[in-house]
Amino acid sequence: MTRAPRDPRIAIVGAGMSGICMGAMLKRAGIDTFVVFEKAARVGGTWRENTYPGIACDVPSRFYQFTFAPNPDWTHRYSPGAEIWAYFERVAADTGVAERIRFSTTITEARWTGTAWAVSASDGTCEEFDFLVSATGILHHPAYPRIEGLETFAGPAFHSARWDHDVDLSDKRVALIGTGSTGVQILGDLAGKVDRLLLLQRTPHWVVHLANPAFSEFTRRLHGRFPAYDRFSYHVNRKIIEALSPALLHPGRTRRFLTWLTKRQLSRVTDPDLRAALTPDSAPMCRRLIISPTYYDAVQHPDVEVITTPIARIEPAGVVTTDGTLHPVDVLVLATGFDAHAYLRPINLIGPGGLTLDEVWADGPRAYQTVAVPGFPNFFMFMGPNSPVGNYALTAIAETQAGYALTWIARWRRQEFESAMPTAEATDRFYVGVDEALPDTVWATGCTSWYLGANGKPELFPWAPERHRVLLGRIDDGDFVMTSAAS
Ligand code: N01
């Protein structure tokens, strides 16, 4: 006699892109017994929090969407942040995920009771769930620079992910610290719109100039009318990026072409001193490759000054560089990146026997095939350590990781197990492969970036993103410790 499937209680932490993806895929599988906990009052994660001028996605929009929620209405090849945020809000509403979200609820702790996850929120409530899914985002915790006197600055000072839209910059002298993807996008938008813009560059990054054309009304209608055409576009974009990704990671013709291209594009900077200052000494892609349609024009705008002398300290009136010069400014913008290694922390995850995630990760974050952690049953993680989060669509990674979690959940529904977690040995085996492959990649050619963990190793997936999909497309029972369902 076949038993009716059980309804799993599932806690998803975070209603950003990944949490919405998990919820939508659960809904599509007919599972409605989940709660999405969201600390803020709206969905959207990084796209809600980052509203700085110039924000856009540097992955083509046709690919930066869920396969189950095509969007024919993208306005540009690389669409602006507000449009992407609206897309995720729409997906959450259309799929019914929005109804399952508990807003303004911060999860502080999740403890395995022996049979379930007891999930506690900051409001003092605690509920039990059969599965815990972390969808807390990777670039989520702003990294504030340790610069002497930062707190003494007299004017407005804010991180790029905490943009203060009440400050009118049009007549201000603005200091922009940081030249990563964010700083480059901000500069591209602000150059010429403020009184003066000082770009404080510590290390130059390679930038590829790619045009960002608008999609015509006709193209948008074509995508709306023929979903198969939209799917085709998605797969073409994916194929191109997936073909380029591994080729760009290793020496060869494609890498030589990228090196040639980035140098050639840098030659748009006509002043040889400025060009030299903007020339990185690391290989392109060692740090995340920056894609911008505007940077080299913006950086040469007469109202923009690039300062490469290191910052000594901040004073109330401005930035002092190590040559003793005070650069007077009215506003300080910190485009100084994120702590990409916190993952779900500061949530206190406590597994069987009281083992905490901090203890398990004392030597650095590690995950079984990017999605699960030994010692923590019925727990899955989005964008976990060594996920393929380089120049790739995180929407596609989320679908792969959600699909994997869903397969386990479907098995639980069929009562094939009660709890499951990866073994330490299987996780070690995964890392033998990772550690063998990483030194051959461009990320290990000697540069610093948020890719590197505390041990100096890149916390990235060292193979083609396709391989991630294949890896998570199957379940290997031998890699797991399972307790069986009560008969
Ligand atoms: O952060 P970053 P980001 N004094 O860490 C500088 C994603 N993203 O926010 O290079 C002076 O790359 C630091 O200097 P250095 C994307 O994955 C995506 O720009 O370390 N400078 C660097 O220049 C991206 O990779 C999109 O020497 C200091 C900058 O701050 C990731 O977010 C758009 C400093 C930080 O660069 C992070 O990008 C935007 C100090 N004390 C972002 N401390 C898309 O389009 C730090 N810096 C999808």
Image (cartoon, rainbow, N blue to C red):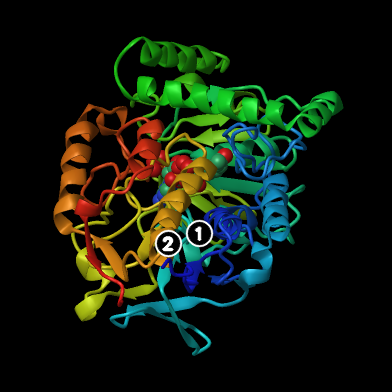
Q: Which is nearer the eye, 192 or 456?
A: 456
Q: In front: mark 1 or mark 2?
A: 2
Distance (Cα) linking label 1 and label 2: 55 Å
Compared with 425, 35 (above or below) is: below
Residue at the image position 23 percent from the left and 45 percent from the top? 456
Q: Residues within 10 Å of mark 1 (few under 14, many from 20)?
A: some
Residue at the image position 35 percent from the left and 53 percent from the top? 371
Q: Amino acid at mark 2?
A: Ile
Residue 370 bears which disc, if any? none
The percent position of residue 14, horizontal first and vertical second, equals: 53, 65
1 or 2: tag closer to the N-terminus: 1
The percent position of residue 81, horizontal first and vertical second, equals: 67, 46
Q: Residues within 10 Å of mark 2 (few under 14, many from 20)?
A: many
Q: Are marks 1 and 2 in contact (CB under 8 Å)?
A: no
Compared with 17, 485 (above or below) is: below
The residue that mark 2 highlights is: 409
Secondary structure, mark 2, is helix
Secondary structure, mark 1, is strand
Residue at the image position 44 percent from the left and 21 percent from the top? 244
Q: Which is nearer the eye, 337 or 108?
A: 108
| The N terminus lies in quadrant | bottom left
The percent position of residue 63, horizontal first and vertical second, equals: 59, 34
Q: Amino acid at mark 1?
A: Glu
Compared with 376, 16 (above or below) is: above
Q: Which is nearer the eye, 206 or 238?
A: 238
Residue at the image position 41 percent from the left and 26 percent from the top? 245
The residue that mark 1 highlights is: 315
Instruction: Tally the marks.
Output: 2
The percent position of residue 424, horizontal first and vertical second, equals: 16, 58
Compared with 233, 185 (above or below) is: below
In the picture as drawn, the residue positioned furthest to the bottom comes out as 124
